[in-house]
Image (tube, rainbow, N blue to C red):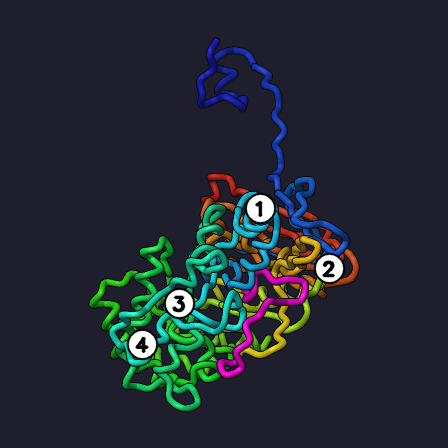
Amino acid sequence: MIIPRLFRGRVSPFLVSLFGFVIALPSQPVLSQEIQITVSSDSGDRLTAKPPARFQPGVHPQGQKFEIRDGVRYQKMDGFGASFLEAGLICINDLPPDQQEEVFRALFDPKSGAGFSAMKTVIAATDFMSAGPFYTYNPTPDDVEMKYFSIARDLGPNGLITYIKRARRYGSFVLQAPMDFPPDWMLLVYQDVDPNYYDALAKYYLHYLKDYESNGVFIDYLSLFNEPGLYTRIPYTEINTLLRDHVGPLFRKEHVRSQIMMSEAPTRENAARNYPIVLDDPVTRKYLSPVLPYHGYDLKNFDHIAALHKKYPQYRLWMTELCHVAMPIYDFADGAFWGNQIFDDLEASTSAWIYWNMVLDEKGGPWLVAPSHGDPDPNNQHPVVIIDRQTKKVTYTGLYYYLAHFSKFVRPGAVRIQTVGTSPGVRVMSFTSPDGGIVTEIMNNNKNAVEINLVFHAKTVALSLPAVSITTAQWQEPLAKH
């Protein structure tokens, strides 16, 4: 006998009266929701998949509780990553071919690696463009039509275009590009830009974008100046004039698809103080990208950047540069410092987080020496990946793993959602994924293991967090929840 579908899985008095007997159906246990757990810790876990956990009904009264509320949504995420600089490719090219590809895979493959998705490149020389001397794309004085413009160095074996193309074999990412200095012949004394060359500088930017694109690399965002005032000495009033009256109109006339970032301040405080000079000009805003980049070298003042976003909520924030000026650090626990920086910036509404040097050698180099352009000697810095050029050993730092927990699991298009709860030394942040899943990042900064409860939609899972660790918990929500 075929039982009507309406009654399958349950027995009702109506069914008994209709058929005259009761059919005993086997009971099916309801499985609780499975949660994938990935851990990196000071005790040796490195993006280690742990046995799945499961939600249980109800809210447990014991233990520290963190409740995830997906009804409260914040910023959409654009990605995480680091920077393409000649120093990194020099180090990678010192490895045997198979090891070179392993490094690219570990950085850019979203399945077997970190899946970096927001990257920085640079416009000509900066402190780790060290495949040759300080350079510009047009050193020919007064060549205002850019007849002698050339990106030839970037096409070399250690060049930026070569680097970017090799990375794109393993993953996709957006690119932003700032400039330390225009050609020296455009500068006055003390490296101020001569306003008589604003049109020439606009053409310089244009040729950069067109030549890169003709060589297979599209720059999503062009940032006019890197840390203006520290490198090129140009005030934001003049940046506004350059953008509004020269770069913006030229790019619109030439139908440039790349978007213009005003510049990137060295600190959060500097950005909050100076960006309104440009943002409050209604004409300039027509040419400005919806992304505001800034650097995090103050290591604090997150409230300043949060206030900037509150005042101009139509713009997304990107933290586009930060680093340790020190010898490379091999201790995994150093990653916790960077994890806390990421948490602080994201809580202040940042949508992308980009570190400076992605790959350097065991000495924190090689660096470019050009004191007249602000590039000192020595200039040891801490990278995401350390390559010992003598032993060929590759070290993925604590910074790599903390950053990878975000870049690998919090993919572009994810949205940060509210997480409520406190526990000493523990930080929790959650996201909805583009595929409908939930991703929760959990840091334990304590030197001892900690037990917490995650609560979501009246379900609870108990988690044990290793000492000095970052844990990613991810799960799919049933379709009925959408």
Whole-percent x and y of residue 340?
Answer: 63, 66
Separation of residues labelled 2 and 1 (CA atoms): 35 Å
Q: Mark 4 packing: few (<14 Cα in 10 Å), some, or many (20+)?
A: many
Q: Which mark is residue 97?
A: 1
Whole-percent x and y of residue 383?
Answer: 61, 63
Callout 2: SS:
loop
**Kind of residue sitting beneath label 2:** Val
Quick check: can you spot residue 21?
yes
Q: Which residue is mark 4?
A: 201
Q: Which residues are magenta?
A: 355-374
Q: Which residue is mark 3?
A: 291
Separation of residues labelled 1 and 4 (CA atoms): 40 Å
Does label 2 or label 4 sit earlier along the sequence?
Answer: 4
Left or right: 220 in relation to 270: left
Query: Which mark is nearer the camera, 2 or 4?
Result: 4
Q: Are marks 4 and 3 in contact (CB under 8 Å)?
A: no
Separation of residues labelled 2 and 4 (CA atoms): 48 Å
